[in-house]
Image (cartoon, grey):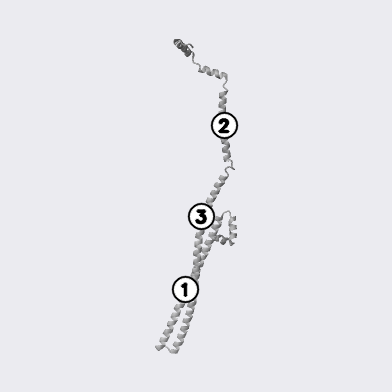
Amino acid sequence: MGLFNRLFKVGQSEAHSVVDKLENPIKLTEQGIRDLKKDLERSMMAIAEVKAVAIRTKRELSEYENRAISYENKAIQLLKSAEAGKISPQEADRLATEAINRKQEAQRGAETANAQYQQLQNQISQLGGNVDKLKSNIAKYENELKMLKARYRVSSATQKLNKSLANVDASGTISMLEKMKDKVAQQESLAEAYGEMAGENTSIDDEIEKALLDAPSAAAGGELAALKERLQLKG
């Protein structure tokens, strides 16, 4: 829910309420990830800017340190020149004192630059940690988005399937099938009944015709009579 809180700047309970009212939370998550990537881009730019300042500060620190060393060397050379008799001791002391003053100024500048540099390094480290955390969150949300899309597709397909199964009777499919079965059974019974009725309703003319068709021919009858006479059988 941290992602949704970030997007809508609302409390956790309000975020839940907003999400519950959404028809498709995938779009919300995609927008949230896009916003986080924009934040990441801005954070990377901020780190680059701070690093640029840190580089300049480190360069200034190095310059101050080199300047302090240079003025110290100059003071030493002035004292050696006075000792060698090249310049008067008073002039050497005056100039060496000025060189030491410049050295001290350079040291103070180096201390200030060093403090700024350390502070910038801490900011860079902190920003880097935030960027790493942001990258981790983006990767996490992108993985969650993939899972959310997969779950959404599965749940949508399951919902449609279950809805279709739930509405089978409502659409009358099973009812029509049952009616069709009854109709076919009735037709079959009716056909069987008509067949039986056809056998029962044979007319006398039909019986006569059938007997004539089944009766033996005249030649066969004569041969039968001759056979009976030979066998001395009575018809």
Inspect this view and state whether residue 29 appears: yes
Instruction: Name the element at disc 2.
Output: helix
Q: Amino acid at mark 2?
A: Gln
Q: Nearer the viewer, mark 3 or mark 1?
A: 3
Disc 3 to disc 2: CB gap under 8 Å: no
62 and 84: which is toward the camera? 62
Q: CA distance from mark 1 to mark 2?
A: 103 Å
Task: Quadrant for residue 165, please give it.
Answer: top right
Disc 1 to disc 2: CB gap under 8 Å: no
Question: In terms of sequence position, does the residue under pointer 3 or pointer 2 come before the other?
Answer: 3
Disc 3 to disc 1: CB gap under 8 Å: no
Q: CA distance from mark 3 to mark 2?
A: 56 Å
Q: Which residue is mark 3?
A: 147
Residue 104 x/y as whole percent: 47, 81
What residue lies at 55% left-to-right and 28% top-to-bottom? Answer: 192
Question: In terms of sequence position, does the residue under pointer 1 or pointer 2 come before the other?
Answer: 1
Task: Quadrant for residue 175, please give it.
Answer: top right
Q: Which residue is mark 1?
A: 58
Q: Amino acid at mark 3?
A: Met
Instruction: Name the element at disc 3.
Output: helix
What residue lies at 42% left-to-right and 84% top-to-bottom? Answer: 76
Q: Amino acid at mark 1?
A: Lys
Quadrant the N terminus occupies: bottom right
What residue lies at 57% left-to-right and 37% top-to-bottom? Answer: 178
Q: CA distance from mark 3 to mark 1?
A: 47 Å
